[in-house]
Image: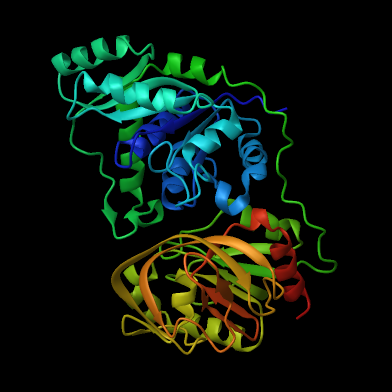
């Protein structure tokens, strides 16, 4: 049974202040000495970095589309084991999910799967009495979603607060916090959302501390904790990164990190380790060599377009990556990793493993995908079906090699990515917890070298 007290932080729409409130709550409760487990609904990699900074624990994603609804509670239990409180930040508006698929992957669905009370963060900057109608509508839309209270954000004055409170008295939902309109906490954004923690250093630490102070000053932490404790026990076994380990010496799997490659799910490294690998993180911006004994390479997502000159200037590492790939070693590259393996990115030389060129684009490519492996690779046998997510503002030409990685079935039919020698490179982000055999297959290929 999973009995961790928990809250889901949701909002009527994006840009209402969910990240500020959720991260601030995590920081405020952690400052009280509580072990706080941070979670994020959906595929987002950036917000969990701020959550991790606030709590000192890995930020973990709960994505019902990529992982399936049956894994949400077990993944939550895995992340929250031994914690005093779990805070789950929602995605978009409370009832918004995968396009055209009802509630799938919505914050509301995850809240129901976790049987967790929801705290609704409302941007009150342009309303007074109407806030009651808004809150009533959200609270009554789905009777299985339990909204336990409201946090009012961007409140202008004492008079404004009084009007809002009077209106909400009629709704029957308590006001659990009021956050005044103030200059934004320093959380700069760019083309794919917030700037990741790894790129900001001490500025990110200061921003999280400021969020924590604003929430501590404006919210009733005792009432929020009391609400979290009303969540009933979940009859679910925690997910565990269990793979039948590959026999023999532990092969070294190098995983790209640092400021240019910040997109990674914690479960991937856990699964690789469980499958028998020794996972070693390296920074392509700083390290001129791959880790000693590297038998396989994982290059996840991030922002190589922001660091193209620096990545290009690190010629010794580019040569090492190219030599490893040409030797037939297993290489798994997602999105940013795909760009890094290309011949060039925005005119700057990259590794040249793939005969393709990448450039920034004005067009945002965003959405869930259904995919099937077109070719046998170090990640998947041909015919393997997986769900994933695309999120980028770059274009790769050509977008697929003579042996593509994936055939896409949604939203349009197309082939995408590259499989050549041991390389599997694609724009598609996947969550290996849904297909743990991916990690074992990759380690098997590493061990076979």
Query: Residue 356's x, y, as percent?
Result: 44, 87
- Confirm whether residue 290 shows in the render: no
Q: With respect to residue 8, does 43 lie above or below?
A: below
Q: With respect to residue 377, does 192 lie above or below?
A: above
Query: Residue 329's x, y, as percent?
Result: 66, 81
218 or 254: which is nearer to us? 218
54 or 445: which is nearer to us? 445
Q: Residue at x 70, y 43 (%)?
A: 239
Q: Residue at x 66, y 53 (%)?
A: 433
Q: Residue at x 58, y 67 (%)?
A: 371
Q: Quick check: 318 left or right of 267?
A: left
Quadrant of the rendered structure where residue 374 is?
bottom right
287 or 141: which is nearer to us? 141
Q: With respect to residue 298, does 220 lie above or below?
A: above
Q: Quadrant of the C terminus?
A: bottom right
Can you name the residue that lies furthest to the right here? 247
The mark tally for this picture is 0
State how the image is colored. Answer: rainbow
Q: Quadrant of the N terminus?
A: top right
Query: Residue 103's x, y, as percent?
Result: 50, 41
Query: Residue 90's x, y, as percent?
Result: 44, 38
Q: Residue at x 34, y 34 (%)?
A: 12
Quadrant of the rendered structure where residue 446 is?
bottom right
- Confirm whether residue 18 shows in the render: yes
Q: Quick check: 202 left or right of 276?
A: left
């Amino acid at each position: 049974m999973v009995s961790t007290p928990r809250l889901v932080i949701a909002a009527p729409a994006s840009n209402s202040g969910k990240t500020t409130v959720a991260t601030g709550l995590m920081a405020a409760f952690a400052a009280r000495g509580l072990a706080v487990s941070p979670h994020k609904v959906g595929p987002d990699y950036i917000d969990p970095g701020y959550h991790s900074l606030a709590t000192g624990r890995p930020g973990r994603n709960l994505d019902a589309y990529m992982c399936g609804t049956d894994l949400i509670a077990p993944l939550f239990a895995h992340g929250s084991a031994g914690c005093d409180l779990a805070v789950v930040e929602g995605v978009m508006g409370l009832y918004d999910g995968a396009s055209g698929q009802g509630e799938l992957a919505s914050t509301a669905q995850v809240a129901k799967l976790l049987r967790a009370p929801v705290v609704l963060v409302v941007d009150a900057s342009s309303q007074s009495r109407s806030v009651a109608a808004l809150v009533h509508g959200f609270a009554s839309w789905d009777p299985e979603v339990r909204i336990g209270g409201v946090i009012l954000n961007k409140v202008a004055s004492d008079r404004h607060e009084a009007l809002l409170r009077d209106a909400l008295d009629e709704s029957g939902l308590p006001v659990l916090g009021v956050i005044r309109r103030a200059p934004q906490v320093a959380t700069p954004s760019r083309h794919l959302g917030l700037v990741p923690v790894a790129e900001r250093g001490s500025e990110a630490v200061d921003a999280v501390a400021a969020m924590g102070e604003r929430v501590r000053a404006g919210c009733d932490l005792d009432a929020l904790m009391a609400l979290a404790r009303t969540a009933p026990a979940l009859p679910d076994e925690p997910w565990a990164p269990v793979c039948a380990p590959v026999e023999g010496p532990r092969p070294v799997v190098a995983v790209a990190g640092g400021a240019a490659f910040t997109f990674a799910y914690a479960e991937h490294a856990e699964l690789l380790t469980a499958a028998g690998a020794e996972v070693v993180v390296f920074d392509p911006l700083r390290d001129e060599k791959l880790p000693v004994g590297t038998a396989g390479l994982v290059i996840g997502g991030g922002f190589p377009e922001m660091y193209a000159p620096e990545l290009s200037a690190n010629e010794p590492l580019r040569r090492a990556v190219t030599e490893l790939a040409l030797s037939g070693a297993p290489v798994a590259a997602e999105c940013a990793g795909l760009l890094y393996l290309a011949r060039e990115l925005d005119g700057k030389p990259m590794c040249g493993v793939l005969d393709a060129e990448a450039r920034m684009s004005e067009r945002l490519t965003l959405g869930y995908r259904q995919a099937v492996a077109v070719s046998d690779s170090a990640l998947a046998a041909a015919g393997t079906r997986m769900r994933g997510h695309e999120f980028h503002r770059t274009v790769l030409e050509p977008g697929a090699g003579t042996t593509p990685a994936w055939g896409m079935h949604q939203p349009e039919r197309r082939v995408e990515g590259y499989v050549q020698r041991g390389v599997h490179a694609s724009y598609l982000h996947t969550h290996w917890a849904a297909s743990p055999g991916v990690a074992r297959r990759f380690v098997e290929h590493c061990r076979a070298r």
